[in-house]
């Protein structure tokens, strides 16, 4: 690859990245949506839905290789193993979702008189029963590692080169939300949201994105921590084990914490240390 080609790729790296992330993920999800809507006759296994989660990671690896070479790949991969961070961030990433889930279980007990069936934590859409640990590992590998390697590992630091943490987060949140669009045509839980489903989803994912930005920047760019939080939060918040109110119980504190983060640390960095920005 010539120097001019590398320069052009660097200039347009984010556009290339998001295009690839969408393309890889949607090549699995659009056929699922067409099949679910009866627009194609092919019977497509719904389990391939999980392969779409790796679009952001694959795009990040490809674009990094094209624009930064082996040094860039090493830097990106090293963020997966950045585990030496303050214990309070581990507590937040793991214990905060667990505590909110426990609160939802207690609320369900008070309102319905029934305790949670924790075996439901082992269920995953479109797959045989995995057991709680198996389901958590699935979330960690797919919509944890598969997404976060791209969204926070690549896109966020590149956006934060040019924009404040808050502005970069808003841009990423919108693109992250629209990446989910095909799922609104085949996933039952998304379809059930109805006409206002996507606008509400966009708002919720914007607040969630701010939490991820705060956690990523505060830990000096640890993909491990944001992946753990993403995995634990999704695993618990979508499970029927938490009762009917689990989504609300776990989402409202996220909104409040996102507001607190911006007010406490300011929009420029949204963390106690300087925002993590790509070097080139």
Image (spheres, grey):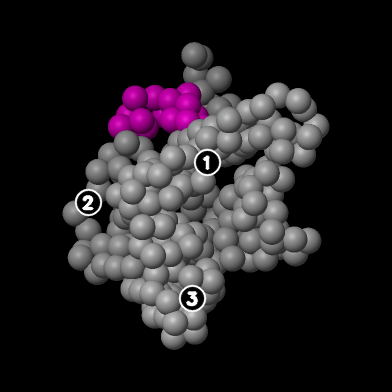
Give the residue at the far top of this rendering.
1
In the picture, the quarter occupied by the C terminus is: top left
Counting residues from the start of the chain, the first of labels 1 and 3 encountered is 1
**Overall secondary structure of the magenta stretch?**
helix
Q: 54 or 250, which is in the foreground?
A: 250
Counting residues from the start of the chain, the first of labels 1 and 2 encountered is 2
Q: Position of residue 154 (x, y in %)?
A: 45, 42
Q: Position of residue 215 (x, y in %)?
A: 37, 62
Does the magenta segment cover residue 121? Answer: no
Q: Are marks 1 and 2 in contact (CB under 8 Å)?
A: no
Q: Secondary structure at mark 3?
A: helix
Q: Quadrant of residue 212?
A: bottom left
Q: Determine the residue positioned at 57% across, 61% down.
A: 205
Counting residues from the start of the chain, the first of labels 2 and 3 encountered is 2
Q: Which residues are magenta?
A: 58-74
Q: Secondary structure at mark 1?
A: loop
Q: Which residue is mark 3?
A: 249
Q: Which mark is residue 83?
A: 2
Q: 65 or 7, which is in the foreground?
A: 65
Say left or right for 198 vs 119. Answer: right
Q: Which mark is residue 82?
A: none
- How far is mark 1 from mark 3, CA to CA? 26 Å
Q: Quadrant of residue 105?
A: bottom left
Say left or right for 175 vs 48. Answer: right
Q: Which mark is residue 126?
A: 1
Q: Secondary structure at mark 2?
A: loop
Give the residue at the far bottom of this rendering.
110
- How far is mark 2 from mark 3, CA to CA? 29 Å
Within 10 Å of the Cα at label 2, are there few (<14), some (14-19), or many (20+) other Cα atoms? some
Within 10 Å of the Cα at label 3, are there few (<14), some (14-19), or many (20+) other Cα atoms? some
């Amino acid at each position: 690859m010539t120097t001019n080609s590398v320069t052009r790729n660097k200039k347009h790296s984010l556009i290339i990245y998001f295009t690839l992330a969408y393309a890889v993920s949607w090549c699995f999800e659009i056929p699922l949506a067409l099949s679910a809507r009866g627009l194609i006759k092919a019977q497509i296994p719904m389990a391939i839905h999980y392969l779409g989660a790796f679009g952001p990671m694959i795009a990040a690896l490809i674009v990094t290789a094209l624009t930064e070479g082996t040094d860039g790949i090493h830097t990106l991969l090293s963020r997966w193993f950045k585990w030496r961070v303050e214990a309070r961030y581990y507590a937040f990433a793991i214990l905060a979702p667990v505590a909110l889930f426990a609160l939802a279980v207690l609320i369900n007990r008070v309102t319905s008189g029934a305790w949670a069936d924790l075996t439901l934590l082992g269920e995953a859409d479109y797959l045989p029963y995995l057991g709680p640990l198996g389901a958590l590992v699935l979330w960690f590998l797919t919509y944890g590692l598969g997404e976060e390697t791209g969204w926070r590992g690549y896109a966020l630091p590149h956006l934060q080169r040019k924009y404040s943490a808050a502005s970069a987060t808003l841009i990423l949140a919108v693109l992250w939300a629209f990446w989910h669009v095909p799922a609104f045509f085949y996933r039952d839980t998304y379809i059930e949201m109805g006409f206002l489903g996507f606008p509400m989803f966009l708002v919720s994912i914007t607040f969630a994105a701010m939490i991820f930005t705060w956690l990523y920047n505060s830990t000096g760019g640890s993909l491990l921590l944001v992946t753990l939080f993403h995995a634990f939060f999704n695993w618990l918040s979508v499970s029927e084990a938490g009762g009917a109110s689990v989504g609300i119980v776990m989402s409202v504190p996220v909104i409040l914490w996102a507001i607190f983060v911006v007010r406490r640390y300011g929009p420029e960095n949204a963390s106690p240390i300087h925002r993590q920005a790509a070097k080139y």
